[in-house]
Image: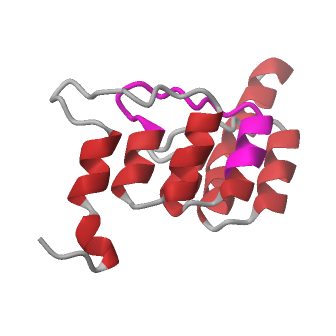
Amino acid sequence: MDSGQERLTAMNDLNQPMLDAALQGDLDSVKKFVSQGADINYNDQWENCAIFSAAWEGNIEALELFHSLGASIDLGEKNLMCNAAFNAQVASVKWFLEKGQDANFTFENGENALHYTISQTNKHGCED
């Protein structure tokens, strides 16, 4: 194997440990793996990625870090803001709006962040 291919293999070997660290909230390890060549935008076979996890959990510190490391916040139909709204993560939704995400983003099926927020009102003890 030539050295270019060896480097590529080594970087790819860092991606899953980086994602695992992100999913566990181990931000120091995420920084370490990215500095060694891991891709902050890596998606595993189930389409998990670092920034999605941070948005879903409402971890603003992680969102800030991952964004500063180059994580994309525009994932198209895997809209981070809408998914954060679905999981009732108001701080994440606010963070995405502050970063310029479209408050009117609508999925192909017509659902949007407002729909997701309303559909989750029972999470906070609201009654019909």
Q: What stretch is highlighted in magenta?
A: 63-80
Would residue 85 appear left or right of 40 to someone viewing this image?
A: left
Q: Residue at x 31, y 43 (%)?
A: 114
Q: Nearer the viewer, residue 32 or 2?
A: 32
Q: Nearer the viewer, residue 91 or 12?
A: 91
Q: Which of 126 and 4 is in front in this view?
A: 126
Work out whether 69 lies above or below 52: above
- As for residue 79 lying within the magenta part, the answer is yes
- As for residue 6 lying within the magenta part, the answer is no
Q: Main secondary structure of the magenta part?
A: loop
Would residue 52 appear left or right of 24 to someone viewing this image?
A: left
Q: Where's residue 32, x and y in %?
A: 86, 51
Q: Which residue is drawn at 86% across and 41% down?
A: 36
- The N terminus, quarter of image: top right
Work out whether 124 lies above or below 37: below
Q: Where's residue 93, x and y in %?
A: 51, 47
Q: Where's residue 35, x and y in %?
A: 88, 41
User: Residue 119 lies in what quarter of the image?
Assistant: bottom left
Q: Residue furthest bottom?
A: 125
Q: Residue furthest left?
A: 128
Q: Can residue 86 be seen in this view?
A: yes
- The C terminus, quarter of image: bottom left
User: Residue 66 lies in what quarter of the image?
Assistant: top right
Work out whether 106 lies above or below 10: above
Q: Where's residue 123, x and y in %?
A: 30, 73
Would residue 74 appear left or right of 127 to someone viewing this image?
A: right
Q: Which residue is drawn at 56% across and 60% down?
A: 58
Q: How many marks?
A: 0
